Amino acid sequence: MKVRHLIAALAFCMATAGAAQTPDPDAVIPTDAVMRQRHALPKSQLATIAGETVHYVDEGKGAAILLLHGSFASLRQWDDMARVLAKHYRVVRYDQSPSGLSGPNPAGVYSLDQRMAVIDGLMDKLKIDRFVIVGTSSAGVPTTAYAATRPDRIIGMVAINIAIARFPFDISTMPKALQEAAAEDRTHPTFHRPEYWRQILLANMEDKARVTPELVRQWTDLNHRAMRDPQVGKAAYAQFTPFSRSAEDLPKITAPTLILWGRDDHETPVDAHGVPAFAASGAIDKTLELVPNCGHMAPQDCPVRLLERTLPFLKRVTGK
């Protein structure tokens, strides 16, 4: 997922441009039935939680782990890691509205309070009292907020390439192919072509072979799904809690904490975000580990190397 600030800035540029003048096949948004056929998993379920439809997957047995994806991604971001984790633990993941098969919140509410209510409601529904919470990229905000405000429910926390402060955006520093895709994208503000998402993914993953046509189609379809609601762009971005909220919450967290960082993350560099996050953490039991040859979208880019560092931590904090 191109992290929130890049896509949000590109989306803003698109919104200022004129609409395409002729019908475009890339603008066709698949129906929900087609979306589910293409992108649902064997254990996909839908439920109404905190007033919104939530698409979630609950698999495995043992100590519970909750996985939170980043902006413009979906629960599919965790496919490779969840496949391994579910052999040892009960793994829960869901599409945060307006993403994935969950879709937009009916009231257009994307506040942090709503995010927290969905986590509470989903875990209560599944009768999970305590769990390890894992969040990546922009999901660092609800991840750290939940760990800080619900300490009785959190066994441990894993934060992967999260942001803790504002940072500058300059598209001129991005790869030329991404600049060209963004320029073309400004000509049609109501949809994104597959090439747009392909360049977003390539810019954030070191292992370019992982940016497959199937992954590009998944990102294109699921983000089209969210864009059906004309209010999504305005409401979702307007109500995103600032990344600085994580800097406020980290000192309040006492649960064992593992902070993982793709060493090649140019979106949220470790010196600007990872090291300060580690320093700010109030946990006595805390570790910061760099993952080589790994970019910002670490769960999709380097899942094996993430698991090598995550599994020992989970075994220690859960006792299993």
Image: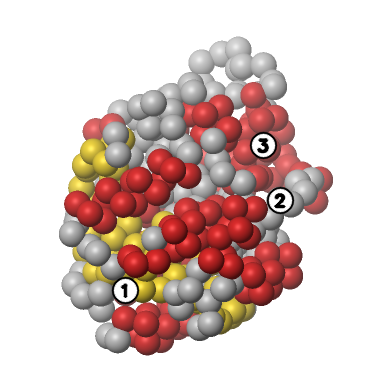
* CA–CA distance in space, label 2 to label 1: 32 Å
Residue at image location 21% in from the left, 75% down from the top: 62
Q: Amino acid at mark 3?
A: Leu
Q: Which residue is mark 3?
A: 10
Q: Position of residue 125 (x, y in %)?
A: 19, 52
| Residues at marks 3 and 2, CA–CA distance in whole angstroms | 17 Å
Q: Earlier in the sequence, mark 3 or mark 2?
A: 3
Tag 2 secondary structure: loop
Which residue is rendered at x = 21% and y = 69% of the image?
A: 60
Q: Tell me the mark number nearer the camera, choosing from 3 and 2.
A: 2
User: Which residue extends farthest right?
Assistant: 172
Residue 59, image x and y in percent?
21, 64
Residue 198 at x, y = what percent? 56, 48
Left/right of residue 281 with respect to residue 266 in the rendered view: left
Q: Residue at x 56, y 60 (%)?
A: 249
Q: How many marks?
A: 3
Please tell me how crowded label 3 is: few (under 14), some (14-19), or many (20+) other residues with Cα within 10 Å: some
Give the label, 2 or 1, closer to the camera: 2
The answer to whether any part of residue 17 appears in the image is yes
Q: Tell me the residue that label 1 is attached to.
A: 85
Disc 2 marks a residue whose amino acid type is Arg
